[in-house]
Image (spheres, coloured by chain):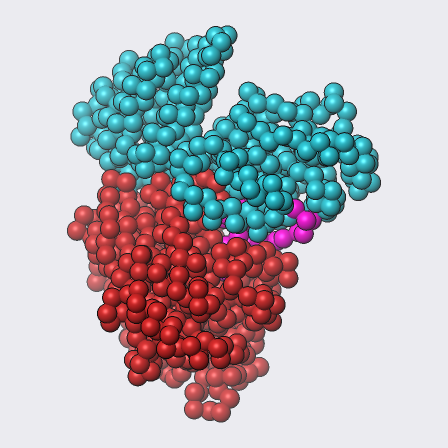
Chain colours: A red, B cyan
Amino acid sequence: MEMPVPSPAILARKAPIVERLRAVLPSGAVIDDPAETRAYECDALTAYRCPPLCVVLPCSTAEVAAVMRVCHEERVPVVPRGAGTSLAGGSLPTADAVVLGVARMTAVLEVSLENRFIRVETGRTNLSVSMEVEAEGFFYAPDPSSQLACAIAGNIAMNSGGAHCLKYGVTTNNLLGATVVLMDGTVVEIGGPEGEALGLDLLAVVCGSEGQLGVVTEACLRILPRPEGARPVMIAFDRNETAGDCVAAIIRAGLVPVAIEFMDRPCIEACEAFAKAGYPVCEALLIVEVEGSEAEIADQLRRIADIARGFGPLEIREAKDGAEAARIWLGRKSAFGAMGQMGDYICLDGTIPVSQLGPVLGRMRVLADGYGLRVANVFHAGDGNMHPLILFDANSADGLKKAEALGADILRLCVEVGGCLTGEHGVGVEKRDLMVDQFRPEDLEAQMRVKDAFDPDWLLNPAKVFPLAVSAGRRAAA
Amino acid sequence: MEMPVPSPAILARKAPIVERLRAVLPSGAVIDDPAETRAYECDALTAYRCPPLCVVLPCSTAEVAAVMRVCHEERVPVVPRGAGTSLAGGSLPTADAVVLGVARMTAVLEVSLENRFIRVETGRTNLSVSMEVEAEGFFYAPDPSSQLACAIAGNIAMNSGGAHCLKYGVTTNNLLGATVVLMDGTVVEIGGPEGEALGLDLLAVVCGSEGQLGVVTEACLRILPRPEGARPVMIAFDRNETAGDCVAAIIRAGLVPVAIEFMDRPCIEACEAFAKAGYPVCEALLIVEVEGSEAEIADQLRRIADIARGFGPLEIREAKDGAEAARIWLGRKSAFGAMGQMGDYICLDGTIPVSQLGPVLGRMRVLADGYGLRVANVFHAGDGNMHPLILFDANSADGLKKAEALGADILRLCVEVGGCLTGEHGVGVEKRDLMVDQFRPEDLEAQMRVKDAFDPDWLLNPAKVFPLAVSAGRRAAA
């Protein structure tokens, strides 16, 4: 992955820059010892690493603004960081950048059950937001699989989804307002509990902007009452295409399950060997979960089974109680662990139209055969968000390189059939140079004009999202 | 309403500008005869009128781009227009502007039931989008009350809602992609059937931008399968506050009715006198409608009635069949007609937190008494979107002025309790100068920077959205 050459002028000014940052922050909030900054040299995309100039850990919006003002005056790039769980390298530092971590900003600022919102500092972890309102029967819907660790700041930056997003949407559908510190230190309030849907809707463009426009320090989030119950049904098929058609038929019928998970044969076999969940041996397995009152659950499961029977399934296994539900989920939930046991893998993240599920799985296998690699699939089928896992040997000389090349081919296939490069992980550095496959030059130009408007010097989160070649002129001029 | 002085230079160049426009459009697509341009001098906010320089009615995205290039080169403002049904003056012309109407662009470009989308030209009316897929059991969810006449272009510009938006969201939640012609004639493709949620989410900022950023010529819209059935329940209360609390409790319980409509006593009395729907005489009436299978409908209505009983209602009347359902809706649906019979009125559009419904209705009455005016309320209570109707005498010298002053006071009250100036009608010219009550200067500045990025010369839809005083420097510099 090509990265821009760090500015020698900034590297040479490290000491005075660190000193200025120390002057505006409490003691201990600036880390510049290389032994300590190493902890920030990568995020969960560990294949790429670079220690930053220094790291700052402010405790308030005012402190973040003070840091931004210093960096703006010194023309130092800033890499915002939540919990560092990005799978796309969203918070990968450059050597000349200040990493601005919000991990110390975890306060709950306001809770209103009546108006169904919670306002938090964005260093707070995703799961702890739900836990804050759990006793009152509420929850925060987006639930990425990293929810124990990941921060709301990163969820907003990447517009994170999760297992429940088919029904509840992704972060942008559950974000009501944000406090954003711009690169020059200006603090902007966007949206609020009532949405404030007037003028230009900046909230939606900040959500998912991967730290390109500003640092989100506080967020107002929608909380929802927990449904009375939930129950899964497992449906086995002898062909991927039939399973894909069944998913499309469920969606077309207007049913909104909480989740429709799809596992293909390589994944089923790995999970079964690992977790022994009692899955049937078959080509494709769907796990469809519905939520609601007992009457709603029974009604929805009946309708889903009726639809599935039309596709000649090998088996329909409805959970009769909590223990059976847990067994159905056991294999799926251990999928990533099971894969890890089989060897190294990279996890992709693309979306396709639901109608293309079957054909794309077939073409993916042909592509993988061409590279002599194996691909296992476990993904959120209801919204067409695929997570192909490419298995490779990290000890072979060109193992990672071949896997990455296959990954790029698969993502291009997603775009070709009308889908896109990322469903919920974001672009980061990982898919940056594939953006030209998704967008025409004038479409990227329109996006970069908005970047210009918020960050004219292109100091925020450098070398992410926009292909280096496409953005070279702007970065050089800044 | 103050409007900027039209440019004498443009007025003087009318003939050559019209000639250049005729050169890039088919015959009959440019209207400059003052007798004919008068039809475009206002939209549904008829209190404000101004004939434009001329009107163009292109038939394709390419023709729109050609018009924009001419206007950009000539530095002529462009006022985009859908069907002209804006209640906020969103397509009010200025004397030096070209009105660009999309009314001739009505084609259906693509339908995919499997992937649940329809792609149309944006001059198509809202209702005709639903009708296009009705036979297959689908519909397009946003349904503003003007849906028979209003165009998708205007729905996107104003981020329109409708009676069903509590469950299905507003336009932004149902818009998947858009073809946008920028002021310089560049054609940008944003989003698509799969949402393309990567890079900066320009779709959301274009949606609701009231023609400030570009002209949306084609749109990809989510279509949904029609639910099996729907049924309303009517609940009567002796106090507004109790009705408001009941709404909050229904929402808090996690129920998602399709609609929760709220009528106060002045509205109930007017509707009953007009439509004789058999409504009880009371202070506040809720109509709650639920949708789904028969089992879901029965389950939801039971839970709603259980909640309502906790608030000591005067009456709970559940529709037992279609005829009873129609009777419950009859009064509500004739509300605007009933009000029209009582005299002149202006219809406001603000939002408040659901928990504030009761207190705000009380304070609104006090404000109205101060002006010696009457206010009737009928609104979408589930999402706190109020539509107070201010009754006034148009024949009295200061009738409209007093009503507008009361309207501004009521909207400021909405902002004060944490709500906002508009729920679904947009800012337009009507609420333009109230934006300073909603936003701090730095928040408006951030919005205007995005406007700069798309339309640096501030030629698009002049004198809307941004207060004249706040945007004066930018408009003068352009």
Residue at point 76% right, 28% down?
B32
Q: How many marks?
A: 0
* Residue A125 in picture, x, y percent from top left: 28, 62
Q: Is-magenta flag for residue A323?
A: no
- Residue ID at (55%, 83%): A371
Q: Which residue is drawn at 21% across and 54% down?
A: A132
Figure check: A151 above or below B93: below
Q: Is the magenta stretch mostly helix, strand or loop?
A: loop
Residue B70, above or below B365? below
Query: Is residue B197 part of the magenta span, yes or no?
Result: yes
**Quadrant of image for the C terminus of chain A:** bottom right
Find residue A158 and report its horizontal and vertical position in percent. 42, 61
Q: Give the range drawn in magenta.
A: B183-207
* Residue in the foreground of this view, choosing between B226 and A154: A154
Q: Which residue is drawn at 57% across and 51% down?
A: B453
Q: Decide which of A239, B112 is in the foreground and name it.
A: B112
